[in-house]
Structures are given as structure tokens and as C-alpha cells.
Amino acid sequence: MRCSAVTTVTGLEWLAAYANTLRFRTALREDMTTDKDEPPTSPSKRPTIADVARLAGVSKGSVSHVFNDRSDIGVSTRLRILAAAEELGWRPNAAAIALSRARAMSIGLIMSRSPELLSSDPFFPELLAGIEQVLAPKGYALLLHMVSDEGPNERQAYKRLAEAGRVDGVLLTDSRVDDPRYLLVTELNLPAIIIGRVDGKTSIPWVDDPQQDEVVAESVTHLISLGHRRIAYVSGPDRYVHGHRRREAFESALRSHSLRSEATISADFTAAGGAKATSEILESASPTAIIYANDVMAVAGMGVAQERGLNIPADLSIIGFDDEPLARWTRPALTTVRYHIQAQGAIAATALLRLLDGETFEYLATPRNELIIRESTAAAPS
């Protein structure tokens, strides 16, 4: 599969444009074996396509066309049909679309993160919520599969999904340097969307903020404006594309101000990893500020620094990444980068469904990340 055209749509524009239809357009086809009028629904009777057609003042065929994403229905008629379906609480049967379109009506997501990280990092529930926000109303199921490594077990998991025809496509998270999954899903003829930036050339479309590196530079500039010159960084694993890209963006931003990193340590995104990295930095260097690759590590690092008698932010400024709900409730409240995780999941799921319907594009842009300044950053100590 090669993308022949480039479509750049911001995530906010995409979500706004489809806000009225994401909950109802399920790409289904309802069995229409009878044209006979049926009495209005009662609380004990499940609404039918005929009920929706009657309430909207259209034919059953028109209702079917709307829920099959046909373009031959006018906007006003389409909205009237969607409103009628909502009022009646009508949803087409998922088995019907699977049969009529020969689809599994399932999307696969294989994750190889450690159980410790998956159980503690709020990133993943937010991402899954965004994905489900799009898939569930359309009658699709999310088939989530966990593997213990990024090697043979992961490869076999993808092969089983493809060979059994259990999914119509897959979402790829945590892009890696020289990621073997790009070639694998292509060989398996599995339609795919990459969530996050890609490494090198690939024909697989991706979704992310294409200017993500800039917000890392903004974090560095914010600290420098406060007088900080000894800035350290706790990155994610270098094997992840976002891990090494953010680290490179951090180091590049320092170089642009004729500075070097006080210390840079790679960790694993867990609280324990963040705490360990912070201890190592504080034992071997004297930073006045530390930037972390996610909020979980930043909060853990804040705790380690406070246990050592450091005042946040008078002695040490801290910046996280993700803007998880916990960030605003820490004391002091955490300065961090807002990464629109749920929107990214929703846009990725929408992109995959568009891909399954035959559209081609290189990437879809998610909402731009932004630096949220709170209480954990202040002027550098004299």
C-alpha cells in the first residue's frame, strides 16, 4: 500500500467537522426484508430502521445510505436521520455490517509495554478512551493484545491476527527506531495507522503533532528565561522514536543557547524509573532544573528531590510531559507539556476507518502540543 496523496488536517478541525456524526455513522447495513409499515416503538420494543425512517420522514434506503457513509444524501437530510436515530436510541446490528461488508468489525492493538508501566501510566487509558470514542458508535470492537517482548512473541501475535482474519486493521503505538512492524504488517496485508512520529520512510500513514519537537524547545527556553543554565533531562527509552527525538530536541535547544546538558539519563517511563534517574542525577550533578519525558517520572522525581530536602521550585524546577490529570494536583502543581492523548486516539481510529474505506493520505495532524506553566518552575536559585 502506497499513499499517493497527502492530506493534512488538524485534529481539532477533524474532530469538529465530524462531531455530529462520530456517534452515529457506523458504516453498517441493516437487513431490509420488509417494506411493510410497522407501528411506532414502545418501551418494550427495540426500535427498527423503519422507525427511524418514519420519524425522519425518509425511506429506509436513505437511512441505510447514511449509516453506510454514502455521499448521495444531502446534509440536512443526513442530520435529520442522525437526530432521529439518536432520539430512538437505534443502532444497526454489528453482525449485519460484518456480513454485508465481509469485515471482522474489529481493530487490533498489540502492546508490548511492561505490566508495571501499563498499570501506572494514565497515558494508556486516555489513549484507549479516544480510540473507543470512535470505534464503539460505529459497531467496531477493539481487540487489545498484550505481549511480553518486542521480538518473536509480538511478531506471532500480528501473524495470528492476520491469518485468522480477526481484525480489519491495526493501530501501531510506540514507534521504534528501525521498527520491524512496518514491514511486517505490509507483508501480512494488514491496514495500519501509526500513532506517533515515524522513523525513516514508510507508506503507512501516521497521526501526531508534526511540530512536537518545538514544544520541547519551548520548555528549554522557558527555563532559560528564568535564569537556569544547569538543566538536566530524563528521557524515555532511546529505542522509541519519540524518546530519541525529544532528547535530540532538548540538546539542540540547549546548543542554540550555547549550553550543554547538565546530565541526561534514559529511563523507562515508570515512577520507579523516574525516581532512580533523579537520584542518579542529583548524586552526580547539580542541576537547577530537570525536564522529564512524562508526568509519571516527573512526579516521582519531585518526590525524590523533596526527600533530599530540596524545595520545588526554589531549589529545583521541574517540567513534565503529557499533562495527565494528576499534574495539576501535585504540590506544587506541575509545569508540563499538554499532549492531547485522547484526541490522538480518536484521530488514529478515524484515520484507520478512512483507510479501510479506500482513502489515501500520508498523515493526519493532531492538536498542537502546548507548554502549560504552573508552579513547579521558578527563577533559578542564585
Image: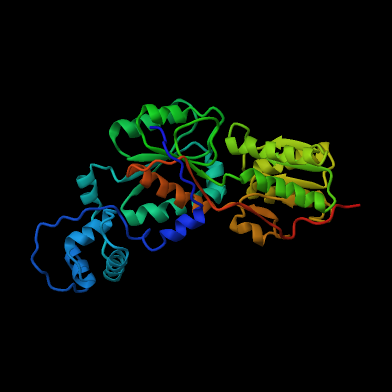
Residue shown at the point (10%, 69%) measured from the top left: 37
Q: Residue at x 81, y 37 (%)?
A: 260
Q: Position of residue 251 (x, y in %)?
A: 74, 37
Query: Considering only vertical position in the picture, is 112 above or below 336?
Result: above
Q: Please determine whether, in this image, residue 199 is positioned above or below residue 125.
A: above
Quadrant where the N terminus sits is top left
Residue drawn at the location 57% of the way across and 44% of the way down:
210
Q: Residue furthest right?
A: 382
Give the image quarter of residue 271: top right
Image coordinates of residue 326 in percent, x first then y, are 62, 58
Is 288 on the left-hand or right-hand side of 135? right
Q: In percent of the image, x 48 and y 57: which residue is there?
A: 13
Q: Is residue 236 visible?
A: no
Residue 189 in the image: state x and y as whole percent: 34, 31
Percent across and percent down for residue 150 are 50, 30
Q: Is residue 153 toward the left or the right of residue 366 in the image?
A: left
Nearest to the observer: residue 156 or residue 339? 339
Q: Nearer the viewer, residue 230 or 194?
A: 194
For the image, the number of numbered tags is 0
- Residue 69, visible in the rendered structure: yes
Front position in the image: 225 or 10: 10
Question: In this figure, which colouring scheme has been used for the structure?
Answer: rainbow
